Image: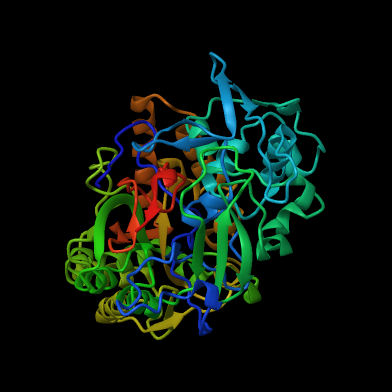
């Protein structure tokens, strides 16, 4: 199902910081799960249903927290939000919130919490959980930029984050009502409340907000959704079962097995019909799964982009900014040197399209007047010469996707850059990607992806309130913050377009990131075992999948 959102919120997406959509390498081989959840031993090779839904999303050492990587089937099944997206990707369904109101000036929001909601440990979910969670999120370093931007406009949030106040006067909870007062309108505030999940205060209030995403809580997180975790085997699998205290319509599928999958296991699992539902970005994987004849493939147009991010701050151990790539002419040369269209056509036929800015060219929000960087190797050579860069010093290009197409892409970029006279070293990052990318920073450029819920997320990465990204690229508060804030506060389509035009021009002017492609997503469904509701959206978001209608055959 193709969906390009042309509304004030642009295309609604999922997920989060640079690595929110990555297929993270996992070198641990998973032993066979518990016999109670093994595929059927029937002669049909596992086609007969045992009533267990098998998907990905199993933990490595821990589950990922849900404010940075906020979407996906697992996190949205464990944690509910105040609102939920409808099938048109609009935040209109009430969920944890039984009702809400917005003041005429769009600066005061009140949410009335649904009665009878419980956390998976039996404790009641309250308005205070919401108030405390928002307050904690204001200081979080692992949080989506749209959330950070929205919560940063709450009265008193700035002072609280800076440590000059212990209170956030714009937040209050009385009985079952949460009131949020803003300093200015936030165009994506309802969208935020449909994607951001509150956490249980009684389990996490003693944790440091700065390290909350690393807490032991994430070994077996307690949520309030329709499914709860009953068994967790790190680097192997986990089991979710129906939450008997769930306040909404209960699902029909009683048990879900979350498998910890490496890239090379996805196709083999599908060939064995041990994978019932999965979101695939790798075109080769999708084609191999399609060959089995056992899967329906649903193509979904999403705002998912791939790009190269410049590490202008340099490696952490050096303590110095990266003067090697500081000259804009060098970064311009690198972009002119890459034939993005040919790479898209050859490596991702039918899936990827080359982009000039982080707003895909096919969207009406794309600014056609932005400076183009079309393939021009001769211009690249001249800019490289003008920059004065010492070509004897190698540039390092890092990546963390492990599929063959990415490996081929990295080799191709290396080839293009070597053709203009550079020496290139490539490195596959393995391990704790958050630490390697944002803390250690031992690279000049990194190949990354971003799935964005709104244009605020696409450009929020340049705002100074995105601490993780600022640690890599630095920040220019005078230029970026005001431009991003102008977008964040607007709901009027014309004014939003003005803000987006400016941001795209700045993007091309600074080249802190080199845009490459926009990518399609594929949802694969095992038609022999699973019957869904036929609703397919961006799998990295919290949208209404109509899970109550899903059945195992």
- For residue 76, above or below residue 376: above
**Residue 265 screen position, x and y as percent:** 39, 79
**Residue 82 screen position, x and y as percent:** 57, 35
Name the quadrant of the C terminus: bottom left
**Residue 142: quadrant of the picture:** bottom right
**Residue 403 screen position, x and y as percent:** 35, 76
- For residue 44, above or below residue 476: below
**Residue 318 screen position, x and y as percent:** 63, 76
**Residue sitting at the far front:** 42
Let me know if residue 256 appears in the view: yes
215 relative position to 83: left or right: right
Let me know if residue 355 appears in the view: no
434 relative position to 381: left or right: right
Residue visible at 66% across and 30% down in the picture: 115
Residue visible at 79% across and 43% down in the picture: 163
Total marks drawn? Answer: 0
Residue nearest the viewer, comparing 225 with 130: 225
Residue nearest the viewer, comparing 287 with 390: 287
- For residue 54, above or below residue 248: below
Residue nearest the viewer, comparing 545 with 372: 545
The coloring applied to the image is rainbow
Residue visible at 64% across and 50% down in the picture: 223
265 relative position to 324: left or right: left
Residue visible at 62% across and 47% down in the picture: 244
């Amino acid at each position: 199902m193709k969906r390009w959102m042309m509304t004030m919120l642009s295309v609604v997406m999922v997920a989060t910081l640079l690595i929110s959509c990555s297929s993270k390498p996992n070198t641990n081989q998973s032993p066979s799960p518990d016999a109670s959840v093994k595929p059927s031993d029937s002669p049909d090779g596992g086609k007969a249903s045992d009533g267990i839904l098998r998907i990905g999303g199993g933990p490595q050492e821990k589950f990922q927290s849900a404010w940075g990587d906020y979407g996906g089937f697992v996190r949205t099944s464990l944690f509910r939000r105040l609102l939920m997206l409808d099938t048109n990707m609009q935040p209109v369904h009430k969920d944890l919130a039984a009702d809400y109101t917005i003041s005429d000036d769009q600066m005061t929001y009140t949410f009335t919490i649904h009665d009878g909601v419980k956390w998976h440990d039996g404790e009641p979910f309250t308005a205070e959980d919401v108030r405390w969670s928002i307050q904690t999120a204001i200081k979080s370093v692992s949080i989506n930029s749209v959330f950070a931007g929205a919560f940063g406009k709450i009265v008193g949030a700035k002072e609280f984050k800076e440590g000059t106040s212990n209170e956030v006067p714009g937040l209050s909870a009385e009985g079952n009502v949460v009131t949020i007062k803003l300093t200015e309108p936030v165009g994506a505030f309802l969208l935020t409340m449909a994607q951001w999940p509150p956490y249980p205060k009684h389990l996490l209030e003693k944790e440091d907000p700065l390290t909350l995403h690393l807490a032991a809580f994430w070994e077996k997180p307690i949520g309030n959704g329709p499914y709860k975790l009953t068994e967790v085997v790190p680097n192997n699998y986990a089991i979710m079962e129906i939450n008997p205290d769930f306040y909404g319509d209960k699902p029909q599928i009683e048990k879900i097995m979350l498998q910890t999958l490496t890239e090379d296991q996805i196709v083999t699992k599908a060939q064995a019909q041990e994978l019932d539902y999965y979101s695939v970005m790798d075109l080769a994987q999708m084609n191999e799964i399609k060959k089995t004849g056992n899967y329906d493939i649903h193509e979904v147009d999403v705002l998912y982009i791939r790009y190269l991010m410049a590490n202008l701050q340099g490696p952490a151990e050096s303590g110095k900014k990266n003067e090697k790539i500081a000259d804009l002419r060098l970064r311009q040369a690198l972009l002119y040197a890459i034939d993005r269209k040919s790479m898209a056509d050859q490596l991702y036929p039918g899936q990827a399209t080359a982009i000039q800015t982080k707003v895909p060219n096919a969207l009406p929000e794309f600014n056609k007047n932005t400076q183009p960087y079309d393939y021009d190797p001769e211009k690249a050579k001249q800019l490289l010469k003008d920059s004065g860069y010492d070509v004897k010093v190698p540039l390092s290009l890092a990546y963390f996707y492990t599929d063959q197409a990415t490996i081929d892409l990295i080799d191709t970029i290396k080839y293009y850059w070597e053709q203009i006279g550079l020496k290139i070293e490539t490195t596959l990052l393995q391990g704790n990607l958050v630490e390697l990318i944002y803390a250690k920073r031992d690279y000049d450029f990194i190949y990354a992806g971003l799935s964005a819920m709104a244009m605020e997320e696409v450009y929020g990465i340049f705002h100074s309130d995105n601490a993780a990204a600022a640690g890599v690229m630095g920040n220019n508060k005078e230029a970026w913050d005001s431009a991003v804030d102008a977008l964040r506060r607007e709901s009027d389509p014309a004014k939003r377009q003005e803000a987006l035009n400016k941001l795209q021009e700045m993007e091309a002017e600074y080249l802190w990131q080199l845009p490459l492609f926009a990518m399609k997503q594929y949802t694969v469904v095992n038609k022999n075992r699973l019957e869904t509701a036929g609703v397919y959206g961006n799998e990295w978001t919290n949208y209404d999948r109509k899970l109550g209608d899903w059945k195992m055959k």
